[in-house]
Image (spheres, grey):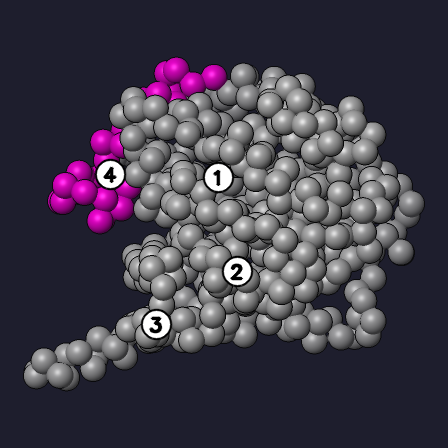
Amino acid sequence: MTLEKAQQNWRMFRAATVLAIACSPLFVAVSSYAQAADKKEATMAKTDTPHLDAVLPAATAEIRPFHVNVPEERLADLRQRIAATQWPDRETVNDATQGVQLTTMQKLARYWATDYNWRKIEARLNALPQFVTTIDGLDIHFIHVRSKNPNALPIIITHGWPGSIIEELKIIGPLTDPVAYGGKAEDSFDVVIPSLPGYGFSGKPTGPGWNPVSIARAWATLMQRLHYTRYVAQGGDWGNAVSEVMALQQPAGLIGIHTNMAATVPADVSRALSVGGPPPAGLSADEKHAWDQLDDFYRHGLAYAQEMSNRPQTLYGIADSPVGLAAWMIDHDIRSYLMIARVFEGKAEGLTREDILDNITLYWLTNTAISSARLYWDTTQLSTGGGFFDVRGVKLPAAVSAFPDEIYQAPKSWAEKAYPKLIYYSRLPKGGHFAAWEQPQLFAEELRAAFRSLR
């Protein structure tokens, strides 16, 4: 085979691979699947899809208190399963190119089985006001902490995968009581943090159809039930998708959004990425850096999304093995994984061993490994082949915090074009995919600054 033919075959393979990836929910243009959902639901939604609240008994609209209480036998069973793990051989390389390394997982498992205490995070959750309400036939769990400031701005914050409400706990104090954390009283927020359907303590959908379009509508219903007539939305990962869809739907009361994983990639850049490059000419230094990050993620970082997009039910192993679940969850993106690996080597990072295990244990105890993965599959059903980071046409005021260790650090030049009403942009010196979890004080300061002009 000639070099020219080999290069041609590689380009064809790369294009086919990226096309397959583009059809996964991690790389679906939310504006496109919002349109697809509207077509799919046309028989129900000639104007706007009505919520089931219109036909269900009034009791379904009630908001009920929620309390976490895990039986001790579940925790004992978890420890026994960790101890009984059948370990694979060590990887044949000296880096993470083959995946999560055996040494990292054994250190994690050892700490999890012997030193980790779930009751600490359980008590921390139970010290917060938690509730459940039924929306469109599904129980939605959420944390709701009101500020003492009567003029606080309500905000609904949405987590992603492999995250949960655990991601957001550290920012509740700085947002609801900024004075205690070096801020000003006029920057206070009322904070609403829901668990995505199929995640954590929310109900598990028993049929298809829960995706960012339906979740965005449910969140608008939730804010309405809480009697908020003026509020903002925030999110990263799936939380960004939900927040941007909310901005596209423009429910009454939503005045703006903030994202820490912005969808800003221009069409020419997206096309070049889909066929394996080279990048378009004339990219600035920041734009080329974003290109390099995206190109690496497209090449090496998508195995989890492809499997959950296509065959989530096949992942029985992560529902049966705690260590299998942990390895699956910490292999989200390379910079997050390397940070987590350093944590279990005893190094100080934005997260602690307890932080990481709190989140994984929540997935385990709620048995949501598969139900959370189905969000990828459900969203794929609406795919029209666009990229997850493609511009979606958000017209509401939008704010962007670009963290350096995110999947890609969105350049200001792209953000300005993606969001015609860009009210705030900041390029941060530290922080990654789980920014609110890793850098809570910095993240809270970002939200205060981002929405100051909308108060």
| Circle 2: residue type | Ala
- The label nearer to you, 3 versus 2, is 3
**Quadrant for the N terminus in the image:** bottom left
Left or right, 447 with reference to 149: left
Q: Which mark is residue 415?
A: 2
Give the residue at x 77% y 34%. 152
Q: Is residue 237 magenta?
A: no
Give the residue at x 41% y 54%. 408
Q: Which residues are magenta?
A: 88-117
- Residue occupying the far right of the picture: 58
Q: Which mark is residue 282?
A: 3
Along the viewing direction, whichever of 144 and 130 lies nearer the viewer? 144
Which residue, given by chain and number where applicable, does mark 4 sit on?
Answer: 101
Q: Residues within 10 Å of mark 3 (few under 14, many from 20)?
A: few
Up/down of 165 relative to 27, above or below: above
Q: Give whichever of discs 3 and 2 has the lower sequence position.
A: 3
